[in-house]
Amino acid sequence: MMDATPIQLDKAAPARPFGPHVLIIGGGASGVILAAQLLSRNDAAFRVTIVEGRHLLGCGVAYSTTDPDHLLNTRAQNMSAYPDRPQDFLDWLQGRPEGAAATGHCFVSRATYGAYMAGLLDGWSGKEADGRLGCVRQSCLQLRETANGVAATLEDGQTLIGDMAVLATGHVQPGADPGGALTSPWSPMDPVDPDARIVIVGTGLTMVDCVLSLLNRVHRGQILSISRRGLLPRGHTATSPMAIDPAELPLGGPMSGLLSWLRGLARAAESQGGTWRDAVDGVRPHVRRIWRSLPTHERARFLRHGATWWDVHRHRIPPASAEVITRAQQSGQFVLQRGQFLSAEIGSDDRPSLLFRPHGSDQAIRLSAGRLIDCRGIRRDPERNATPLVADLLATGQARVDPLRISLEVTGDCQLVAGDGSPSRRIFAIGPASRAAFWEITAIPDIRDQIAQLAAALSAHGQPKGP
C-alpha cells in the first residue's frame, strides 16, 4: 500500500482545482477498481481518498493469498478492471516475464491478479502524480452526512471530509470463533501433524483453496469436507453462451417457474451439442434483472432451496484445480460428507472436535481433528458480524439490513438505504457490500460494470441526485 497525506476537503475554500472528492471505504478489489475508474475519467477531475486499514491495496481477502495453487475461477480475458478496455488485464499479464505466453483462456493465480490490482493506481501515486489520490492506512469507524458532504472518523481520531462516500468493504467476515475450535481459512496455516485428520466445514470455492494448500504441503492425513448438500463446484470447460432475448426472461414469477425455465435452457443447449454451462453463462448477464424482479418471499425460497445449486454451477473451478481434487477423492484422502454442522469445541486433550449430524441420520457424531476450518461461505449475517463502521451505521439509523439479511440494503443506484427507508444522497455501497440488491456482484466482471455505471452517474451529476 502506498503512503500519502490524507486528503481533506474544505468546503469553505474559495476555489477547488479538482472536482468532487470521493471517500472510498475499503481498499480491496472493489475500492481500487472504483478509484481507477473515477481517476481515469475525462469528464470529471475526481479526487479520491482510499481508507484501508487491513490489506494491501487491491488485494483484500481474495487476492492476499500467496499460494500459487490458488487460481482465479474466471478466465484471464474476463478480468480487466475496465469494461471499455477488456484487454487491460491480459495486456498487463503478457507484459510480464511469467505471463508472456498467457492466453485469454488461461486461469492465473490469485496472487498474480492481486499484483495487477495493486498496480492499477500507479499512474496517480508516483512523484509525477497530480495529487488527486490519497491513501490512508486506517480503519473507518463512523460516517456522517453533513449539509455539504460526508465526514469519516478514523480509528486514530482524525476526520476526513468528502463530497460523498462509497462503502467498498467486501464480504461480511465472521468474527473469531469464541471457543477457538474453528480456524478461519484466511488465517496463516500453522504447522499441523501431516498425518492428522483435517475437517473443513463447507464445500465451496474456499474449501477448494484450503484443500489445494494442504495437498501442496504434502499433507497425508484424511481431509473431510462437510456440508448440508455435499456439493462440489463444477469444473470449467469451453463454453458458448446462449443468446437470450430479455423478452424471454421469466421476471417476477415463482421460483418453480424460474427453475423450469433454467432446466429448459440447459436441455436446449445440450440438444445443440453444448452443455448446461452454455445456458448458465447465457443467463449471467440477466441475473441482476431477474433477482430484482423477484418478490422477497421468492428470493427467500431461492436462498433456501436454489442458491447452493446455482453457485456450484455458476462459480466453477479451473481444470487444474478440479484435477487435483478429483485425484484426492479417488485416492480416498479427500472425502465429502453430507451432513449438518452442529458445534465445535476444544476437547480435554486440547484438540478441536466437531459435532455434526450425517444426512438421513437422527444421531449426531463427534469427530476429533488436527484442525477444523470454517469455510461456510460468504452469506453471513451483516449485523451479527458487523464491523465497527457497519455497527455504527445501523445504530444511528443511517443504514438497515435487508429483509433477508444478506447485506446492508441499497437501491438499484447503489445508494445506502437508511433505517426509515430513505436513500442516502451521499453514501453508496458497491461490490459484495451491495449484494442484497444485486446478488451476482462478487465476480470482477459484474463489479466493474456496476462501478462503471456509478462512476458515470457521479460524473454526470457532480453529486448524487436527491431521493
Image (cartoon, rainbow, N blue to C red):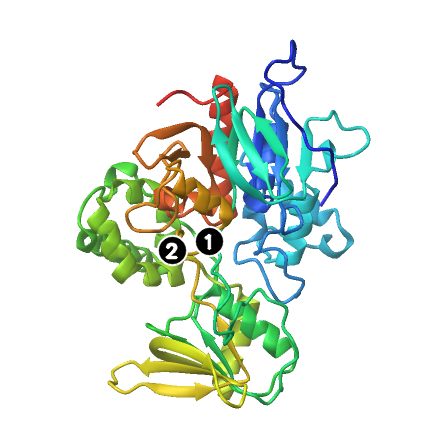
Vertical arrangement, residue 195 with respect to residue 146, above or below:
below
Q: Quadrant of the C terminus?
A: top left
Secondary structure state at the residue bearing disc 1: loop
Locate residue 360, reporting x and y percent: 25, 82
**Type of amino acid at the residue the image marks with label 2:** Asp
Image quadrant assignment for residue 37: top right
Q: Earlier in the sequence, mark 2 or mark 1?
A: 1
Give the crowd class for mark 2: few <14, some 14-19, many >=20 residues within 10 Å: some
Decide if residue 123 is on the left or right side of residue 24. Answer: right
- Asked whether residue 40 appears in the rendered view, the answer is no
Locate residue 114, reporting x and y percent: 65, 52
Q: Are marks 2 and 1 in contact (CB under 8 Å)?
A: yes
Locate residue 415, reporting x and y percent: 41, 32
Residue marked by disc 1: 172
Give the crowd class for mark 1: few <14, some 14-19, many >=20 residues within 10 Å: many
Disc number for residue 381: 2
Name the residue located 25 percent from the left edge and 53 percent from the top edge. 300
Name the residue located 48 percent from the left edge and 37 percent from the top edge. 449
Image quadrant assignment for residue 250: top left
Residue nearest the observer in this picture, 13 or 46: 13
- Separation of residues labelled 2 and 1 (CA atoms): 8 Å
Q: Residue furthest right?
A: 127
Vertical arrangement, residue 358 with respect to residue 442, above or below:
below
- Asked whether residue 319 appears in the rendered view, the answer is yes
Decide if residue 343 is on the left or right side of residue 128. Answer: left
**Type of amino acid at the residue the image marks with label 1:** Val
Vertical arrangement, residue 280 with respect to residue 248, above or below:
below
Name the residue located 47 percent from the left edge and 18 percent from the top edge. 461
Q: Quadrant of the N terminus?
A: top right
